[in-house]
Image: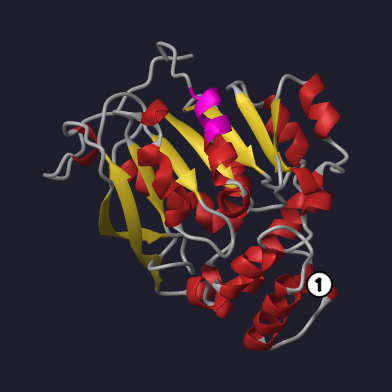
Amino acid sequence: MPSPTVCAVPQSTNALMMSSNTELTKTSIELEVLGVRLKLAVMYRPGEGAPVLFLHGFGSTKEDYADVVLNQAFDGRPIIAYDAPGCGETECADLSAVSISFLVETARHLLAHFAVIDFHLVGHSMGGLTALMLADAEPTRVLSFINIEGNVAPEDCFLSRQIADFPTGNAEVFFENFIERTWHSRYHSSALYAASLRHKVRAAVVRGIFTSMVELSDHGDLMRRFLSLPCPRMFMHGEQNDGLSYLSSLRENGVRVARVRSCGHFPMYSNPVEMWSMIADFFRFPDE
């Protein structure tokens, strides 16, 4: 792997270069992305080496990854995670501006804020697609990439394609119906996931995110982008999604495929112990 570098941060805190510890720090970082003012809710830990950037999925928050500090494989490693615009505690001045491309630019701006050059990527679902687009745009900066059921093909739009399958001009009505449909899903942890959606996502952001996810999945050549990345890659999926058509192709093209037992789309809720064990096994950080 190329040698990672974390430059000195111009802020007085020099956040990622302080002595490492086992705790995560929560803070708010004000940014302007494509003319939109953001107040990002961020959690991070300083340390040595290239940081790991964690991107959460639709309907989730940065806390999906908070248990990273309990994993010895990451001891001393800088960690960055944040609530995407429209999600969690992050404030966004224009929710209608949010799409996957906007989320990619948000990640770029936050990396610049911390003066990060090289980094590792972990992304789930919406965060996996955001991570893929970021890695495709910045391939020399990404040292490794774990894609947890992030979109790489049209078949991955089982949640986001509902924006077309159940059309309505009322964002609140669509979101309420989406939550109800998700609650009744037979996939692991669906009801648990659905129960918190009202608290974690603003309804006004759903259309922009879902529409852009479907557009990229159908026409964005995502599989080629993923297979073309020069860094080590892992694709993680739940046992209930063994039927994904492209799993054998991923293996044949050098992608490590990790199957989480007793799990659907949400390993961090259904089987977090196995998920973190697989992540730790992938991350050995040899010399970088």
Viewer-proximal residue among 114 and 137: 114
Counting from the top left corner in percent of width and height, residue 82 is at 40, 54
Counting from the top left corner in percent of width and height, residue 20 is at 21, 32
Residue at the spot 78% in from the left edge and 51% down from the top edge? 156
Residue at the spot 40% in from the left edge and 49% down from the top edge? 66
Task: Please tell me how crowded label 1 is: few (under 14), some (14-19), or many (20+) other residues with Cα within 10 Å.
Answer: few
Outermost residue toward the left? 12
The count of marks equals: 1
Q: Determine the image quadrant of residue 92.
A: bottom left
Q: Reply above or below: 180 against 98.
A: below
Residue at the spot 17% in from the left edge and 39% down from the top edge? 14
Q: Which span of residues is magenta-colored?
A: 277-283
Q: Amino acid at mark 1?
A: Ala
Residue bearing the label numbered 1: 164
Horizontal arrangement in the rendering, residue 173 relative to residue 74 (left or right): right
Viewer-proximal residue among 62 and 132: 62
The quadrant in which the C terminus is found is: top left
Horizontal arrangement in the rendering, residue 235 relative to residue 13 (left or right): right
Q: Main secondary structure of the magenta part?
A: helix
Horizontal arrangement in the rendering, residue 158 relative to residue 147 (left or right): right
Residue 258 seen in the current view: yes
Viewer-proximal residue among 262 and 76: 262
Counting from the top left corner in percent of width and height, residue 221 is at 77, 41
Residue 118 seen in the current view: no
Q: Reply above or below: 207 against 73.
A: below
Q: Determine the image quadrant of residue 246.
A: top right
Q: Is 282 contained in the magenta span?
A: yes
Counting from the top left corner in percent of width and height, residue 265 is at 69, 52
Horizontal arrangement in the rendering, residue 160 relative to residue 155 (left or right): left
